[in-house]
Image (cartoon, coloured by chain):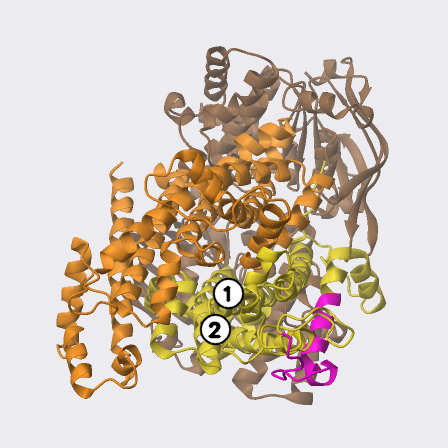
Chain colours: A brown, B orange, C yellow
């Protein structure tokens, strides 16, 4: 298939595209002279970190910019016509019918007030004057091709009644309904669990190939893009870094930046044996809605002192709930927790200040974890005041020390969170937790919302801090690569139960319990044949 | 289906409960009567005997709870007792006083609502469709002005222009039973016009704001990416999701028409229930005040219940649970 | 899950840039609003120095006198100077309204945020009570209470203040709920902060813009309410100068084509318009909803 791609005609040609975004102090470039060509039936992967401009370029391929952005130069030639010069009406008629878009969050992109089928056929019925019966049958056919279950029933449901993975496939069907020549996939699986992701990737790839649709596949995950794309372009700060056919890029990347994109996968910490347990969780149950829903079922975990215990699972596994129980935010309904051999009161209110100080929680999204109206000085310094009674110059000095420890430096002391980048905010979160000099730090998916390169930096920082302070980490994550990179021991959770626990090397090598096997197999590898092998193995 | 019925039932029960609580609050305001209240009604020179007789008449000598249940039972039957303005031999039942007034107010409210609501929603839709255009800016400034000024200002300006300088309509709105439609319209034209101006502004602004609020949603962006026309986006994609706040503001203004139009009634000397309440407050005619307050509360709670039910009805998550 | 951007959302450069941005964003209506508020504030504060005559001073034996050089806007039904009474009316109305609005805010905001932060039973009970009070339209509640306690200035301020507190409670509670779900509030709980700290140091600073806008709108509403009550004869009692009662006293003139009743009404109208324009601009800035293609 790749061979005869080069003989196909050019479908989309972007030449020296420039896009600017409006900020308080004027217009800044976010796409700075990007050019690309796409042929019929070809899949181009756009990869880069957040802010690289990939989504913006994807939208621009339809002649669309988000509010606050404008196209300041270049040409976007689709099927011979420059989209930037077309009258609005013509541009509108192209969208949905000749060029379609699949958004990252299908749950947010479907209108909650209408049924799925009605939205799927909207373009066909209104823009292509297809009779409704025919459009409906067509849509159901696409649903089946994308391997959605109970197609008749699902079509008549509302978006909130359907799961994320199914909704994402319905959105793909909606995009395909008019058999467009080009589909833009904007991070379609980023918000999905690993095991769901596999199904969606397989479905998308199959349907795109069968209908010979050209596609731009946008993602930040190199492993995913290597399954889906013929060619890959790496973007950074709105500029192209390098571009090559997939296999070539993976086997011999030219730029150092490209290589750094999979640095996390290359990190590997040798697991250290345990000394004693700082925290013992014994047979705990936890429920929501006064016992109606059991979220933790007979969970027992032992956390080794001065080491990193990774708790891994997908959404709904109970890993975050476990963190909430340990911090006292959620009351357990059975069992108990021992901290340093002493029983920990189950509820926040009944714990002493010392107990509160010794266990610190770090959140996933630093956007919501730092009060936007407080400066770094107060964000980091409050615990110094609260637990150690430090104030004034003493406090200022210690805050400076903590900022140095997280590799930021005291010049950040006056900043507001809004002035910091994602990685910097997460470092402030860490500094804040360290200010309490805790024995146990619970890290709840703290790197999941960060770009891959930044993730690597934060994980290195964590490892260094552990060496210096001998703090214990309970590291909650869904990402296997992170687990390999940082943990000494691993606990695997599924649906509120512990599936497996033990030293990292023994958990991550066979024999596996069923769920662990499924979990590990679903993690995409940076190998273009990975998905093919997985699908063949299933049959 | 069962879930929806349960929710409706819950809301209904809450409404009744709220009404009961409110009735207690209304009734207990009487309990706060300062000591020389009787004298305030009967006059400073009332003799102790008259005062005692009066207190007996309004039942101040019986325990509060007993009086409350008596009053409530009567209210349910439609009997609110006698007005304080009644004297032995010239009894004036509260119902007879406020009955016709209520009818008048409802007529005025009905006429106004029939004109104002469709007008406001259409104007709001158009403003949302053509946002930031000259039409939108002018409408925005005009409605902001209209909701800022006191109602009597609007009323007097309209009287000045349309009844005095250019005698088109009447400045006093009298209402007689068995008036013909044309005569009714002629008489009520100015108050209806005033009220319309006041409430259209509010409803139009909220409609526009509600739709623009929804227009920022991801699914509207998706609709744009599907090449859906702007008109269809506003009507099919945005409006269904904005119905709840729009219903809320419409019912709020309906309640205002019945309950808050007292200023208009005073300016146009229109015998409505708002004016009855004001007169009763001035003369400390407590039974009338209580009856009016209870009626108003009933209206308000009922209209809020409708808004609530519309909000539930337009929310697919509640109507079609997983 | 949303990936955090590595680009900061705001600039760290302050002062001169901020002022430039500020000036770029203001509209004519906003300036109009500021001008009006400034003018009214001056009049209210320096009333006794600006007014040519006293508040209740009878200057002419001619009631409803014509507009002369001495009495700019004529005299009222007792021969008092309308212009002076308008000025004193500004002081009285604005003073009372400001006092009532402040009561509304102190009570409504602290209760609202506390209910949102504590949640659970406390929240449910307070909300139900407020719902019950709000089941009656504000004007009616005030009228009922006035029929019981009488219309003194103190009563007016307290009644209108408390009646308005229910709306502010609802608003404060609803915006606080958006904040209390944030992780930083949970973090404050987890590290052992007191309720007072959470309410005033974590939540309040984040809801200030909404509250400021609401203060402006509430103030307008209170001005209109007091004028309406005075117009009905139940508000500020004569001989104190008040715009609402002035309208009532001269109402009959309108049938002769005399605009005198419109003067105090216009005074109210302009104040309300000015504040509303300013608040509208403020909300427009704060929400920053941009419009598009």
Image quarter of residue B114:
top left
Between C134 and B28, which is closer to the camera in this rendering?
Answer: B28
Between C52 and B207, which is closer to the camera in this rendering?
Answer: C52
Q: Chain of mark 2?
A: C
Which residue is denoted by mark 2 in the rendering?
Answer: C235
The answer to whether mark 1 and mark 2 are in CB contact below 8 A is yes
Residue farthest to the front, as pictured: C61
Both on one chain, marks 1 and 2? yes
C94 is higher (above) or lower (below) than C33: below
Mark 1 or mark 2, earlier in chain = 1
Image quarter of residue A417:
bottom right
Q: Position of residue B155 (x, y in %)?
A: 55, 53
Q: Position of residue C115 (x, y in %)?
A: 41, 69
> Which of the labelled discs sits on residue A160, or is there none?
none
B66 is higher (above) or lower (below) than B228: below
The segment highlighted magenta reads C35-62
Which residue is denoted by mark 1 in the rendering?
Answer: C228
Residue B155 appears left or right of C165? right
Q: Sort mark 1 into few (<14), some (14-19) or many (20+) by Cα contacts within 10 Å.
A: many
């Amino acid at each position: 298939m790749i061979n005869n791609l080069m003989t196909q005609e050019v479908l989309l040609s972007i030449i020296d595209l420039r896009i600017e975004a409006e900020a308080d102090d004027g217009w800044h470039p976010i796409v700075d002279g990007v050019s690309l060509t796409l042929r019929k039936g070809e899949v181009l992967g756009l990869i880069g970190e957040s802010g690289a401009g990939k989504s913006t370029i994807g939208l621009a391929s339809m002649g669309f910019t988000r509010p606050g952005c404008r196209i300041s130069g270049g040409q976007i030639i689709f099927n011979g016509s420059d989209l930037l010069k077309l009258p609005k009406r013509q541009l509108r008629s192209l969208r949905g019918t000749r060029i379609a878009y699949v958004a990252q969050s299908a749950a947010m992109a479907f209108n909650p007030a209408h049924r799925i089928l009605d939205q799927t056929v909207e373009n066909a019925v209104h823009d292509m004057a297809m009779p409704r019966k025919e459009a409906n049958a067509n849509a159901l056919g696409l649903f089946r091709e994308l391997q959605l279950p109970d197609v008749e029933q699902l079509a008549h449901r509302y978006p909130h009644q359907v799961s994320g993975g199914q909704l994402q496939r319905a959105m793909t069907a909606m995009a395909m309904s008019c058999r467009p020549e080009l589909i833009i996939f904007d991070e379609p699986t980023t918000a999905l669990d690993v095991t769901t992701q596999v199904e969606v990737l397989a479905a998308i790839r199959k349907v795109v190939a069968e209908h010979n649709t050209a596609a731009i596949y946008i993602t930040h995950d190199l492993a995913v893009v290597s399954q889906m794309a013929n060619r890959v372009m790496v973007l950074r700060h709105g500029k192209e870094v390098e571009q090559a056919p997939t296999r070539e890029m993976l086997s011999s990347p030219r730029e150092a930046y490209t290589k750094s994109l999979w640095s996390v996968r290359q990190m590997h910490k040798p697991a250290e044996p345990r000394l004693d347990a700082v925290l013992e969780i014994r047979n705990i149950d936890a429920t929501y809605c006064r016992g109606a829903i059991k979220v933790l079922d007979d969970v027992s975990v032992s956390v080794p002192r001065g080491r990193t215990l990774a708790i891994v699972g997908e959404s709904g596994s109970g890993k975050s709930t476990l963190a909430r129980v340990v911090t006292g935010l959620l009351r357990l309904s059975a069992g108990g927790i021992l901290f340093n051999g002493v029983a920990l009161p189950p509820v926040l209110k009944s714990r002493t200040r010392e107990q509160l100080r010794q266990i610190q929680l770090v959140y996933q999204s630093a956007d919501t974890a730092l009060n936007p109206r407080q400066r770094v000085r107060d964000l980091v310094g409050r615990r110094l005041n609260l637990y150690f009674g430090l104030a004034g110059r003493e406090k200022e000095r210690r805050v400076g020390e903590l900022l140095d420890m997280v590799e930021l430096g005291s010049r950040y002391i006056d900043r507001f969170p809004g002035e910091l980048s994602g990685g910097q905010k997460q470092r402030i979160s860490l500094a804040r937790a360290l200010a309490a000099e805790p024995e146990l730090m619970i890290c709840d998916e703290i790197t999941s919302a960060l770009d891959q390169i930044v993730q690597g930096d934060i994980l290195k920082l964590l490892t260094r801090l552990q060496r210096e302070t001998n703090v214990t980490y309970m590291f909650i994550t869904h990402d296997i690569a992170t687990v390999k990179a940082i943990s000494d021991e691993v606990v695997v959770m599924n649906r509120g139960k512990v599936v497996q626990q033990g030293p990292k090397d023994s958990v991550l090598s066979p024999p596996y319990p069923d769920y662990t096997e499924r979990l590990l197999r679903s993690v995409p590898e940076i190998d273009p044949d990975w998905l093919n092998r997985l699908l063949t193995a299933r049959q | 289906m069962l879930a929806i019925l349960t929710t409706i039932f819950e809301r209904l029960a809450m409404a009744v409960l709220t009404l009961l609580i409110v009735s207690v609050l209304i009734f207990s305001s009487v309990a706060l009567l300062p000591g020389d209240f009787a004298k305030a009604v009967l006059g400073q020179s009332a003799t102790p005997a008259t005062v005692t007789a009066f207190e007996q008449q309004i039942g101040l000598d019986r325990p509060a709870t007993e009086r409350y249940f008596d009053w409530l039972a009567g209210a349910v039957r439609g009997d609110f007792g006698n007005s304080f303005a009644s004297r032995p031999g010239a009894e004036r039942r509260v119902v007879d006083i406020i009955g016709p007034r209520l009818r008048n107010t409802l007529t005025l409210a009905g006429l106004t609502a029939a004109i104002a609501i469709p007008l406001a929603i259409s104007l709001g839709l158009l403003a949302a469709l053509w946002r930031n255009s000259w039409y939108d800016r002018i409408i925005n400034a005009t409605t902001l002005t209209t909701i800022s000024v006191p109602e009597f200002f609007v009323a007097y300006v309209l009287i000045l222009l349309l009844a005095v300088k250019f005698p088109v309509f009447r400045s006093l709105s009298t209402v007689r039973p068995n008036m013909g439609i044309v005569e009714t319209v002629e008489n009520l034209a100015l108050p209806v016009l005033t009220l319309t101006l006041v409430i259209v502004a509010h409803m139009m602004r909220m409609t526009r704001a509600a739709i623009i609020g929804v227009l920022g949603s991801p699914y509207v962006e998706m609709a744009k990416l599907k090449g859906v026309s702007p008109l269809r986006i506003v009507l099919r994609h945005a409006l269904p999701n904005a119905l709840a706040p729009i219903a809320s503001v419409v019912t709020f203004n309906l309640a205002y028409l019945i309950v808050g139009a007292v200023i208009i009634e005073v300016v146009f000397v229109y015998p409505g229930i708002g004016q009855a309440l004001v007169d009763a407050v001035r003369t400390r005619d407590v039974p009338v005040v209580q009856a009016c307050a209870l009626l108003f509360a009933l209206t308000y709670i009922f209209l809020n219940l409708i808004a609530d039910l519309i909000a539930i009805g337009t929310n697919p998550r509640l109507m079609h649970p997983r | 899950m949303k990936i955090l951007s590595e680009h900061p959302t705001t600039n760290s450069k302050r002062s001169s840039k901020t002022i430039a941005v500020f000036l770029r964003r203001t509209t004519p209506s906003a300036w109009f609003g500021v001008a009006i508020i400034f003018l009214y504030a001056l009049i209210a504060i320096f009333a006794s120095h600006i007014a040519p005559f006293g508040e209740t001073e009878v200057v002419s034996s001619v009631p409803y006198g014509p507009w002369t050089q001495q009495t700019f806007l004529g005299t009222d039904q007792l021969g008092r100077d309308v212009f002076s009474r308008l000025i004193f009316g500004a002081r009285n109305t604005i003073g009372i309204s400001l006092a009532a609005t402040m009561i509304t805010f102190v009570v409504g905001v602290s209760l609202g945020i506390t209910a949102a932060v504590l949640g659970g039973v406390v929240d449910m009970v307070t909300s139900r009570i407020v719902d019950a009070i709000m089941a009656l339209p504000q004007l009616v509640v005030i009228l009922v209470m006035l029929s019981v306690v009488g219309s003194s200035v103190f009563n007016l301020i307290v009644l209108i203040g408390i009646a308005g507190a229910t709306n502010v409670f609802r608003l404060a509670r609803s915006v606080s709920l958006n904040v209390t779900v944030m992780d930083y509030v949970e973090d404050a709980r987890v590290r052992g902060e007191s309720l007072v700290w959470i309410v005033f140091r974590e939540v309040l600073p984040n809801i200030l813009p909404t509250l400021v806008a609401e203060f402006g709108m509430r103030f307008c509403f209170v001005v209109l309410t007091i004028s309406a009550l005075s117009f009905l004869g139940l508000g500020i009692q004569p001989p104190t100068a008040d715009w609402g009662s002035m309208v009532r006293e001269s109402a009959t003139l309108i049938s002769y084509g005399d605009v005198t009743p419109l003067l105090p009404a216009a005074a109210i109208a302009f104040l309300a318009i000015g504040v509303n324009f300013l608040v509208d601009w403020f909300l427009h800035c704060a929400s920053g909803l941009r419009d598009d293609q």
